[in-house]
Amino acid sequence: MPLQNRVTPLGEILAIPDRGLLMGNRGALAKKPGILGKALFRGKRWIICDTEFAGPPLPLMQPGKCTQLFFLDEAVALAAGHRPCFKCLNKAAKCFVAAAWPQKPGVKAAAMDNILHEQRIDPEKKKPLTHTSRFEDLPCGAFVKRHGEAWLVLHSSLVRYTPSGYDRRIERPTGHATVLTPPVAVDALAGGYSPILHSTACPETKCERPERR
């Protein structure tokens, strides 16, 4: 039976067999072993982690422990409001900060988490926030919501997200888009941050896992 620990760009946490390329957490969310509680987060520290980081594997979804969450790829994790971990993805975290805040390269993790939290969660409804931008202004790696579905911006195209991979490609539209990726993460992508993408996003290109530690 799949555990409810797979995060989508729309902010949902699903129980599906696929696990994806990366993991992360946003606090202790399990109310019982293997069972998610009602809370979608505990605190403002939402991170992206390497599934291959050194150390023994830990039991999944244990009460009182950080609940392991999984993402198809890094673009999905960014859209869901997470950012690279300074411990297991230190190199990526530093690149993210430098790309998002080129004038303030010394931004600390806590300050970054405060800014991200304001941009990702409606404090009253406790639901993910969206914002508006023009399609032509969005960088590769950003996610938009179109007809209730999540689509990845990729060069001149949009590719549709599914939990098992990207399955459809259309020409990038013009006009205004409903953006799922928080503004700070969009700034990082526009500033040159290159997220890890699932191989189905660019099936014509060999997908190699970059060194992000």
Image (spheres, rainbow, N blue to C red):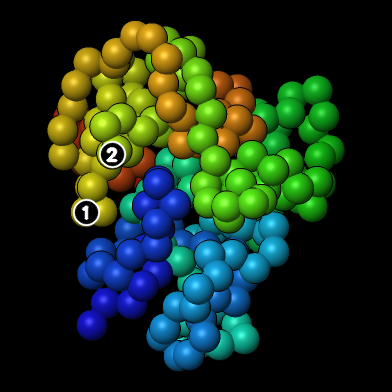
Rendering quarter of residue 97: top right
Rendering quarter of residue 18: bottom left
Question: Can you give x and y, in whole percent of width and height, for residue 131 in the image?
Answer: 53, 29
Question: Can you give x and y, in whole percent of width and height, for residue 185 in the image?
Answer: 58, 35
Residue shown at 60% from the left, 76% from the top: 28
Measure the C-alpha gap from mark 1 to mark 2: 14 Å
Residue 51 visible, this orientation? no
Rendering quarter of residue 65: bottom right
Q: Amino acid at mark 1?
A: Ser
Front residue of 77/191: it is 77
Q: Which class describes the residues within 10 Å of circle 1: few (<14), some (14-19), or many (20+)?
A: some
Residue shown at 57% from the left, 52% from the top: 125
Question: Can you give x and y, in whole percent of width and height, for residue 145 in the image?
Answer: 36, 33
Q: Closer to us: mark 1 or mark 2? A: 2
Q: Which class describes the residues within 10 Å of circle 2: few (<14), some (14-19), or many (20+)?
A: few
**Circle 1 residue:** 164
Residue 149: which numbered mark, if any? 2
- Label 2's element? strand
- Label 1's element? loop
Q: Judge from the rendering whether residue 70 lies leftward or rightward of residue 27; answer left or right.
A: left
Residue 191 visible, this orientation? yes
